Image (cartoon, helix red, strand yellow):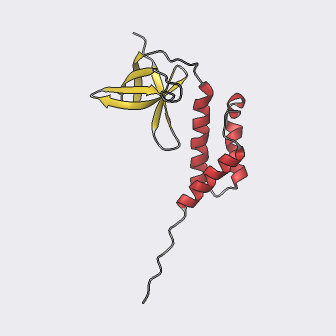
Amino acid sequence: MNREVCETVNTTHNKQKIVVRGYLLVKDKNRDESFYWCCEQRDSRNCKGRAVTTLEGQIHILKKFSEHNHAPEASRVDVIQALNNIKELASQTHEKLSQIIHDTAIEMPEDSFYYMPNSQALRKQILHIWLRNLPSQPQNYKK
């Protein structure tokens, strides 16, 4: 029996997705040792694509796979990984906005870069992360 290992990808909201044959799937539920996944485009494209995996250690092994009603989008995985990289850089460094975006763009495949959000949207995401990581202001109180 041929074991197919599924790559896992964390979204920008720290939720887990798996990559199966170029498709991205989100966790629907899990029962005992089995994890049930549905296509991330279930609602937008009415896709019925599903997968069932089992967890061996930290690795998801594909057990069942149903076909999707659309073509796989391999570049989506690169985009999600790049957005995660931007989020991590923004929260850990004090580099300029443009430098964070530039560093991420250099690392990703050229054909996937065209699917990235525009630079204005990326700047807003970085600013949002910076604002969220600011220390809270002390409350004023009367003596």
Q: What's the residue at 62%, 56% (across, down)?
A: 127
Q: Quadrant of residue 37?
A: top left
Residue 83 horizontal side relative to residue 31, left or right: right
Q: What's the residue at 70%, 34% (across, down)?
A: 113
Q: As drawn, which residue projects farthest toward the top?
A: 1
Q: What's the residue at 41%, 28% (across, down)?
A: 59
Is residue 22 or residue 1 the one in the foreground? 22
Is residue 55 or residue 133 the one in the foreground? 133
**In the image, residue 6 lies at what x, y percent?**
46, 24
**In the image, residue 114 lies at what x, y percent?**
71, 33
Q: What's the residue at 49%, 29% (across, down)?
A: 43
From what the image shows, is residue 92 above or below residue 57? below
Quadrant including the N terminus: top left
**In the image, residue 124 lies at what x, y percent?**
64, 52
Quadrant including the C terminus: bottom left
From what the image shows, is residue 70 above or below residue 83? above
Q: Quadrant of residue 103?
A: top right
